[in-house]
Amino acid sequence: MKNNISFAFKTDTHNYLVSQTTVYSNLFKYKESHDEVMNFNGSLLSITGDISENSELKNLTNYLKYVELSLEIDVNCNHIAKFLSDTIYQSLKTRNPFSSQVIVIDKDDVVLVDQYGYLFKDNIVFTGFGGYFLYGIYDSYKNTLENNCDEVAINDFISKCLATLKEKFIMEANNWRIDKIDRNGTINTGFITI
């Protein structure tokens, strides 16, 4: 069951990844962790879905390190997303398919890989049930976020999204991690409690 929510969006100067720090397994609180977002060569990954599948997908990214070293290439956001997309899609042919979703961002791209292995690039992506409530908020901020965006507008957008999620869900949606990547690849991480 996909109880945790992450979303990522692109502005004219930065890419943002907002993810819950409270990890749930069905209706039970599994853990509180500030380290659920993975950093792989400047690309950030947020995996939501079944706890055991998330661990398995995180371990599979170690294979990408092997590919990077053996082929002497720089693995980027697109390589990671394509690899995870193929992995999730191939799992659909097994008895235990993955039911995880992955957001991958870097300085240039915002990518979602859904539970069917579909790879989706856009200016905003959501995992879990967040998309049901947040696309409308994004529509009202779209022009502001994409053109000459300032920190006040970004903070207002994030605050409205988090307040909406807290209001709509019975699960605890108080603790969040916010990662920001500028166009040079510099990553800043902060935590917020609402």
Image (spheres, rainbow, N blue to C red):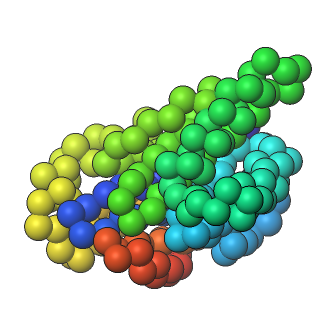
Task: Kindly identify the residue that appears in the image at 62 percent across and 26 percent down.
Answer: 116
The one nearer the camera, 115 or 3, is: 115
Horizontal arrangement in the rendering, residue 60 relative to residue 74 (left or right): right
The one nearer the camera, 184 or 172, is: 184
Task: Kindly identify the residue that appears in the image at 64 percent across and 63 percent down.
Answer: 72
Q: Residue furthest front?
A: 71
Horizontal arrangement in the rendering, residue 120 relative to residue 49 (left or right): left
Residue 127 in view here = no
Residue 88's quadrant in the figure?
A: top right
Task: Kindly identify the residue that appears in the image at 47 percent across and 53 percent down.
Answer: 7
Residue 100 in view here = yes
The one nearer the camera, 82 or 5, is: 82
Residue 7 versus residue 97 in the image, above or below: below
> Residue 148: where, in percent of width, then height?
11, 67
Residue 152 versus residue 60 in the image, above or below: below
The one nearer the camera, 24 or 183, is: 183
> Residue 133: where, in percent of width, then height?
40, 41
Q: In which quadrant is the N terminus drawn?
A: top right
> Residue 50: where, in percent of width, then height?
77, 43
Horizontal arrangement in the rendering, residue 12 relative to residue 112 (left or right): left
- Number of numbered callouts drawn: 0
> Residue 89: where, in percent of width, then height?
68, 27
Task: Kindly identify the residue that appears in the image at 52 percent across and 58 percent down.
Answer: 76
